[in-house]
Image (tube, coloured by chain):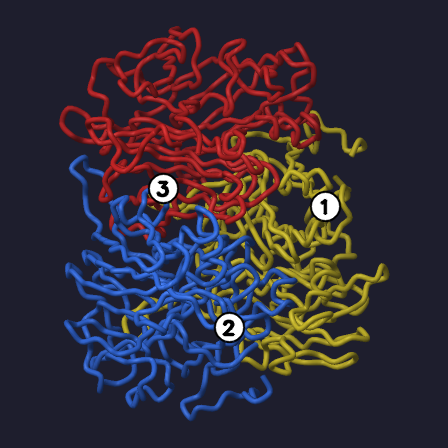
Chain colours: A yellow, B blue, C red
Amino acid sequence: MGTTDDMGATGAKGITGAGAADATDRRGFSRRMMLGGAAVATVATSLSLVAAKDATSADSAAGADGAARTAPAGGEVRHLKLYMEKLPDGQMGYGLQKGAATIPGPLIELNEGDTLHIEVENTMDVAASLHVHGLDYEVSSDGTKLSGSHVEPGGTHTYTWRTHAPGRRKDGTWRAGSAGYWHYHDHVVGTEHGTGGIRKGLYGPVIVRRKGDILPDRTHTIVFNDMTINNRPGHDSPDFEATVGDRVEFVSITHGEYYHTFHVHGHRWADNRTGMLTGPDDPSQVIDNKIVGPADSFGFQVIAGEGVGPGAWMYHCHVQSHSDMGMAGLFLVKKADGTIPGYEPHEH
Amino acid sequence: MGTTDDMGATGAKGITGAGAADATDRRGFSRRMMLGGAAVATVATSLSLVAAKDATSADSAAGADGAARTAPAGGEVRHLKLYMEKLPDGQMGYGLQKGAATIPGPLIELNEGDTLHIEVENTMDVAASLHVHGLDYEVSSDGTKLSGSHVEPGGTHTYTWRTHAPGRRKDGTWRAGSAGYWHYHDHVVGTEHGTGGIRKGLYGPVIVRRKGDILPDRTHTIVFNDMTINNRPGHDSPDFEATVGDRVEFVSITHGEYYHTFHVHGHRWADNRTGMLTGPDDPSQVIDNKIVGPADSFGFQVIAGEGVGPGAWMYHCHVQSHSDMGMAGLFLVKKADGTIPGYEPHEH
Amino acid sequence: MGTTDDMGATGAKGITGAGAADATDRRGFSRRMMLGGAAVATVATSLSLVAAKDATSADSAAGADGAARTAPAGGEVRHLKLYMEKLPDGQMGYGLQKGAATIPGPLIELNEGDTLHIEVENTMDVAASLHVHGLDYEVSSDGTKLSGSHVEPGGTHTYTWRTHAPGRRKDGTWRAGSAGYWHYHDHVVGTEHGTGGIRKGLYGPVIVRRKGDILPDRTHTIVFNDMTINNRPGHDSPDFEATVGDRVEFVSITHGEYYHTFHVHGHRWADNRTGMLTGPDDPSQVIDNKIVGPADSFGFQVIAGEGVGPGAWMYHCHVQSHSDMGMAGLFLVKKADGTIPGYEPHEH
């Protein structure tokens, strides 16, 4: 397992540049950028369109009355600039700023009803694109060469993503809403299915929330891409930190060639839309291990250490050779005093 | 991607022979055979046991009042003749007529409560069988050599499939009904598990509907069989046509050796029995990508172009090497005037 | 297919040693050990913490009034001794008695709210451990070398597993209960992920039941471990017996390196927590085939022969090469007179 990683880790509130000191989050994980209007941080690794919260409030998903915070209704129209870039090590990434691309790319959060216009600039020397799963977009935003919606080297293309709340159609049937744990990726580099771009890191998470969905304290993205986690070499997979009681959201995305099984020690989730049971009548299976294949995505929230306490909890692919080759990291759940029983960070 | 394909594509009404002109369906997709009584088309690629509709009604799943059409209660007893044949290219198929076998075999639709007696004639020079998933059948209709329910070359065997509506057992527990997206296949050719027969094309779709289930305008079957779609060579996968607003049903079946991920661009479905949410309380995940393995099957309905408009929308296996090797086709969603923005059919 | 196997097969009542005559169960399947208090059978292959039933009652899950029996509320604290041992053939297993290890290990059943302290003795010459999925345990019971919770050769370690009923958190969100079809396995032998221990047989089933969950007549565990079923050689997979009308529970666990598809002939289940629909509003898909990967687990109950009658029903991995290599067994559903139509046991 590798060093603590905060790429793709976001706090639930505030406008925060990744390079900026973050006095409101003692754990240094908060890198969420809120676009409450024109405000844009200089460097950021995620985009949230949820209403910005008071940056001085307690670092918890619970409100003052103890109730979990929930997502508001959507309906806003937003604009975003995204860069597709070569990283110094030859990999590729999406970034909100020039020179700041990350793997995975920035977390993009929307509420059902929101529209997002993304101007994508391709700073690389090969054509690339932005293809999203789950959202509404016209074929001109499909991100395929077939539809001509890719971006030539040095060029730009504006992709428009729309989302919608669920509702009843005129014919009486129920139309599902856009809410879900989705993702975006290149569909052009290397092959007409973006095999080369995806392999090198051109992917990222998208969360669409429904009004009333529970909001987490922070979100971590874990991408099983071929035999890597987030394109990290084996045995250098990202670790994620939390304090007992934090409401932590994980987004699991798979890419590449292989099937995997996503497993977390000591924590479970429901195999449904939110990863959380809706109540006693929800028949969904509760699991801690799930088979996944390329382009699958799902997400869930856990209360760190709930019922199990602090600890260095492994998460890993449970295909035996994959975990043995290093597809494993740690969910480091600390006590309030910052320590983790039985775990010496310097050893790992 | 290959040429437009209408094998396994069926209109929702009328008795239509595959070779016959079909004045009531301008898109030439309707090949459903209705057995409302003794009427049998000369050549057909699917069987529906739902009540035959007026062949002159509007080509839409919505009734005159705009409400979606729904499946009636079952309870009928039907008879069908099915042929197992070698195709000219050495593949094998099931057909409703001699010399008319197709890959996949004919779509068989039932309503919960229906019984179907299928007299299967084996015109090939090797033993073969008919094994179905999901339905009720005695072991004499299992289609295995173990049970002696296979068909010798030149022979016939009658398989009886029964279905039932859900209900409460005497012990108070709930018994699930037969409704589902199921399938049939050989269980004998090559090995005692039919590996050779399945590889060559001996498989087809079965849909069992529950009273009140929404009926589609048409149904398309997509079988990921080893590295092919519907046994077509790579880069010649079937395309499927629709007009914006059509209610289109897809049946996804997997066979062979490999796992795949089934993905459609611009359209989503619910990961539940019907592929459609039952309403706001249905906790099922909405997805556009699903990991599948041999003999898995599921289905769903989409409104073509809903929220995304017309276009040449890819569907493909999302395992990168599989799509690169040609496991990809098009869902061609046309405007009312028959055109598709940004798509020139002659290019593909 | 191999000979009838009763490892992992348990009757639903009574304290029964595996080596003891079992006059109350004419089919010789009952090997469940009830720990109603201090009572311990001399040799047993499973542990149940549900309240012991009258061993003279009818061999059926239905009570005197015909209603299905259900699980009681939990809340008890239990103690168990478990041995990790080398088997004579070089494989490894967990056992409730010295010299009595089995593959899979004993079935451990709990009710939500129960706590189980397991003193594990390692009689082998390599370090090994006990890691459980789905239950609540502190990191000192994680069974990893990372946490120091493994067992050195000749040593012992006490693992504590807790379970909890579902309920509402203070923040208003719903906390899932522990109920589920879970499993335990080594996490140490061979690699830090227990690849060697799992391969050799160090795994077993755990069922946590919710108050009101339907209880089966008996439970069978089927583990797809690499290319074996329950570590049996190909074409010698276990068969399981029942009489038409029995309520039979299957626990499906996967381990090792490969993905599989779990298929049963003539019987289906719901893809939800219990494998049984909760009623007419449960939207879960009913299936008879499910893709699974290492460490996945699920379970379900069927009424043997319901709607299909007696027979030698195959269950098998539906990946074609896997079934052809012998990953297939029989679910032998007998008539009340003990015969199975069309099946001669001596042939197989």
Question: Which disc is residue B266 wearing?
Answer: 2
User: Which residue is found at the position 21% from the left and 61% from the top?
Assistant: B211
Helix, strand or loop status at disc 3: loop
Quadrant of the rendering where the N terminus of chain B is positioned: bottom right
Q: State which chain disc 1 sits on.
A: A
Q: Residue tagged by mark 3?
A: B146
B212 or C231: nearer the viewer: C231
Distance Cα–Cα, label 3 vs label 1: 51 Å
Helix, strand or loop status at disc 1: loop
Left or right placement of residue A21 versus residue C24 in this view:
right
Q: State which chain disc 3 sits on.
A: B
Q: Amino acid at mark 2?
A: Gly
Q: Amino acid at mark 3?
A: Leu
**Residues marked 2 and 1 touching at CB (< 8 Å):** no
Residue A255 vs A177, above or below: the answer is above
User: Which residue is found at the position 41% from the left and 83% from the top?
Assistant: B243
Question: Which disc is residue A151 wearing?
Answer: none
Label 2 or label 3, whichever comes before in sequence order:
3
Q: Amino acid at mark 1?
A: Pro
B247 or B252: nearer the viewer: B252
Left or right placement of residue B97 versus residue C177 in this view:
left
Q: Residue tagged by mark 1?
A: A238
Left or right placement of residue A276 versus residue C196 in this view:
left
**In the rendering, at what x and y percent does residue C36 appear?**
35, 12
User: Which residue is found at the position 81% from the left and 33% from the top?
Assistant: A346
Q: Residues within 10 Å of mark 3 (few under 14, many from 20)?
A: many
Instruction: Between label 2 and label 1, give the one nearer the viewer.
Output: 2
Res. B48 image quadrant: bottom left
